Amino acid sequence: MIDVVSMTYFARVALLCCVCGAMCVRPAAAQSSTPSTEFFAGYSYLHDPGNVVLAITADDANFTLGWTAGVATPIWRAVSAVGEVGGQYKTSTTLDDDISLTYYSVLGGARAAANVGPIREFVQLLTGAVYGRASGFGEVDAATAFALQPGGGIDYPFAKRVAARLQLDYRYIHGSDGRSSAGQFRVVAAIVVH
């Protein structure tokens, strides 16, 4: 279970980082129109060193099957509110049984963006919950924990209202229920529609 003191602390840190990030963003001088609401969806690769949250497999840290989707809407100048969901899946085969590992995330936060020529670069800070589940050998272990996910990326337009996105994130998962905190790295390749 997530304690309220930790959530309050991380929420304050997230807000402070978003405000600082928004103040550092250059104006989008090359932008020809006002920012619009965007929808994005795509592939997500997750590297979870040691699978600390689930603690079932320690040597296979890559989740190559994953997805992410979300929406971002402008709230002030180059700052947008972002909502994102995602899932990562993996099955490890042993001599006795298959071990299935799954992560789902529901995150929200702020993004600051700027145009550099045709490329739109962004930084964002998201916070929310990550649910992890492991099953194997007739047992199931599951946990939900608070997560803080800073990241950034670029959007490259290839049509009037469509862009390709490459994004890198680091996800900090706060330890709960006797579990240690964890750090995960994520790479996203997505399509963005404005």
Image: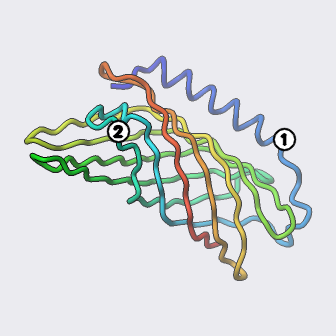
Is 184 positioned to the left or the right of 81 in the image? left
Residue at x 51% of width, y 66% of height: 41
Going from the N terminus, do you reach mark 2 or mark 1 first? 1
Residue 193, by quadrant, is: bottom right
Residue at x 17% of width, y 47% of height: 94
Q: Position of residue 186 (x, y in %)?
A: 52, 49
User: Disc 1 designates what residue?
Assistant: 24
Q: Please say if 119 is above or below 140.
A: below
Q: Residues within 10 Å of mark 1 (few under 14, many from 20)?
A: few
Is 16 positioned to the left or the right of 83 in the image? right
Q: Please say if 182 is above or below 102.
A: above
Q: Position of residue 16 (x, y in %)?
A: 70, 29
- In-front residue for pair 30/5: 30
Looking at the image, how many numbered discs can be counted on the residues? 2
Q: Please say if 1 is above or below 73.
A: above
Q: Where is residue 88 in the image (x, y as percent from the top left)?
A: 38, 53
Residue type at numbered disc 1? Cys
**Mark 2 vs mark 1, CA separation in Å:** 40 Å
Helix, strand or loop at label 2? It is loop
Q: Please identify the residue farthest to the front as the structure is shown.
A: 95
Residue at x 56% of width, y 21% of height: 9
User: Disc 2 designates what residue?
Assistant: 59
- In-front residue for pair 148/169: 169
Circles 2 and 1, Cβ within 8 Å, touching? The answer is: no
Q: Position of residue 122 (x, y in %)?
A: 72, 53
Helix, strand or loop at label 1? It is helix
